Image (spheres, rainbow, N blue to C red):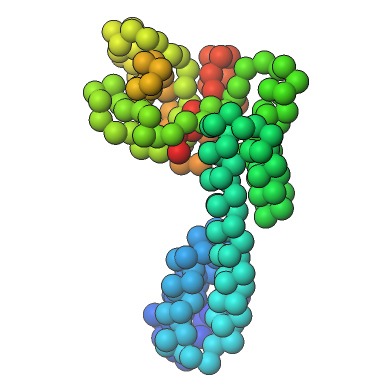
């Protein structure tokens, strides 16, 4: 809604209604669809005849369905990738791209698969199950996007690196390796930006470590 329209709404229905619509629009724009849906529904409780909120809820129904399909496809593709079934994984990633043609993660992982098939160099993205890892003290680790800059088999060497570089570490319980990371991001886009914009200049052999 435009600011002038929101002002008219506030005068007619009150601040709570205006804030619900304003916040719903904000969450809608940032693709936080579940929260946006809750707030549009809240606005409709105050004004059941609001055609704008009704229209938005119809749009959200479609968008949330697409998001659910996207998440399911990417999860399936990630599992195939981790199992070494790269052709099948690539097909799933490619299918997921129809929901967001600008998705950097999908583009990068597809490019990495193609590079693998052509005998190219190392991986910038490494995918693993989070349950296969612990922290350096044996506790469970969070899923997410880690910027890894070094790996060690010896725990003392890992601890020295962590101390010298203010780094954290995750331990692969199967491979018996410690992977030291200097940053952790909440999204692939943020991790990629950090890796390419800062870390690679200092540590060329670094990568994004994704724990699912």
Q: Position of residue 113 (x, y in %)?
A: 68, 29
Q: In the depicted view, which residue is nearer to us: 96 or 47? A: 96
Q: Is residue 79 above or below residue 34?
A: above
Q: Is residue 105 above or below residue 194?
A: below
Name the quadrant of the N terminus. bottom right
Q: Look at the image and tell me whether residue 97 can be seen.
A: no
- Which residue does the image show at 46% across and 79% down from the upper left? 41
Q: Is residue 34 above or below residue 43?
A: above
Q: Is residue 207 above or below residue 57?
A: above
Total number of numbered labels? Answer: 0
Whether residue 212 sits left or right of residue 131 in the image: it is: right
- Which residue does the image show at 35% across and 22% down from the upper left? 173
Q: In the figure, residue 60 lies in which quadrant?
A: bottom right
Q: Position of residue 147 (x, y in %)?
A: 48, 26
Q: In the figure, residue 162 lies in which quadrant?
A: top left
- Which residue does the image show at 49% across and 72% down from the upper left? 37
Q: Look at the image and tell me whether residue 181 can be seen.
A: yes
Whether residue 93 sits left or right of residue 80 in the image: it is: right
- Which residue does the image show at 53% across and 18% down from the upper left? 206
Q: In the depicted view, which residue is nearer to us: 155 or 164? A: 155
Q: Position of residue 58 (x, y in %)?
A: 60, 77
Name the quadrant of the C terminus. top left
Q: Position of residue 121 (x, y in %)?
A: 67, 15
Q: In the depicted view, which residue is nearer to us: 37 or 17? A: 37
Whether residue 84 sits left or right of residue 117 in the image: it is: left
């Amino acid at each position: 809604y435009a600011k002038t329209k929101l002002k008219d709404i506030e005068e007619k229905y009150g601040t709570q209604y205006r804030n619900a619509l304003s916040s719903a629009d904000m969450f809608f724009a940032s693709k936080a669809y579940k929260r946006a849906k809750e707030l549009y529904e809240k606005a409709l409780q105050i004004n059941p005849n609001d055609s704008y909120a009704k229209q938005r809820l119809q749009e959200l129904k479609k968008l949330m369905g697409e998001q659910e399909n996207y998440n399911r496809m990417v999860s399936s593709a990630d599992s195939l990738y981790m199992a070494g079934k790269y052709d099948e994984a690539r097909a799933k990633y490619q299918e997921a791209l129809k929901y967001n043609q600008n998705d950097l993660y999908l583009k990068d992982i597809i490019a990495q698969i193609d590079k693998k098939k052509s005998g190219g160099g190392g991986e910038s993205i490494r995918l693993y199950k989070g349950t296969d890892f612990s922290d350096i003290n044996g506790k469970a680790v969070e899923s997410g996007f880690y910027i890894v800059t070094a790996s060690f088999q010896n725990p003392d060497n890992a601890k020295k690196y962590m101390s010298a570089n203010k780094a954290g570490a995750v331990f692969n319980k199967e491979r018996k390796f410690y992977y030291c990371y200097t940053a952790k991001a909440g999204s692939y886009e943020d991790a990629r930006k950090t890796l390419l914009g800062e870390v690679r200049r200092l540590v060329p052999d670094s990568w994004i470590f994704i724990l699912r």
